[in-house]
Image (spheres, rainbow, N blue to C red):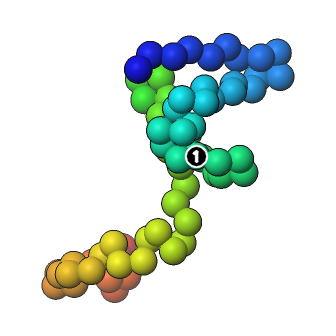
Amino acid sequence: MTTTATLSSKFQISIPKAIRDEQHWSAGQEFVFVPKATGVLLIPVPELAQLAGIAKGANPANYRDRQDRY
């Protein structure tokens, strides 16, 4: 799907409805902008509840602690 948007004089861009619906984005949602070469990645900031359990099964062995910092 290729869609375009125009940057307004107030430096605002409206995200096309097809993209919003496909990504399940809603008004008031926060995003982070990550510069990449000549473009920018637009990534939604996850809710705290969405992060629950993402490290399940992680191995804490050899975890770098503050004691080994210079």
The x, y position of residue 3, in whole percent, is: 51, 16
Q: Is residue 42 visible?
A: no
Q: Residue most toward the right?
A: 10
* Residue 34 in the image: above or below residue 45: above
Q: Is residue 29 left or right of residue 2?
A: right
Q: Residue at x 33, y 72 (%)?
A: 54
Identify which residue, 63 or 38, lies in the foreground. Answer: 38
Identify which residue, 23 or 67, lies in the foreground. Answer: 23
Badge 1 crowding class, 10 Å Cα cut-off, few under 14, some 14 to 19, many 20 or more, is some
Task: Give the position of the C terminus as an image quadrant.
Answer: bottom left
* Residue 5 in the image: above or below residue 35: above
Q: Residue at x 41, y 20 (%)?
A: 1
Q: Residue at x 47, y 38 (%)?
A: 22
Residue behind mark 1 = 25
Q: At label 1, which amino acid type do we have?
A: Trp
The x, y position of residue 8, in whole percent, is: 77, 17
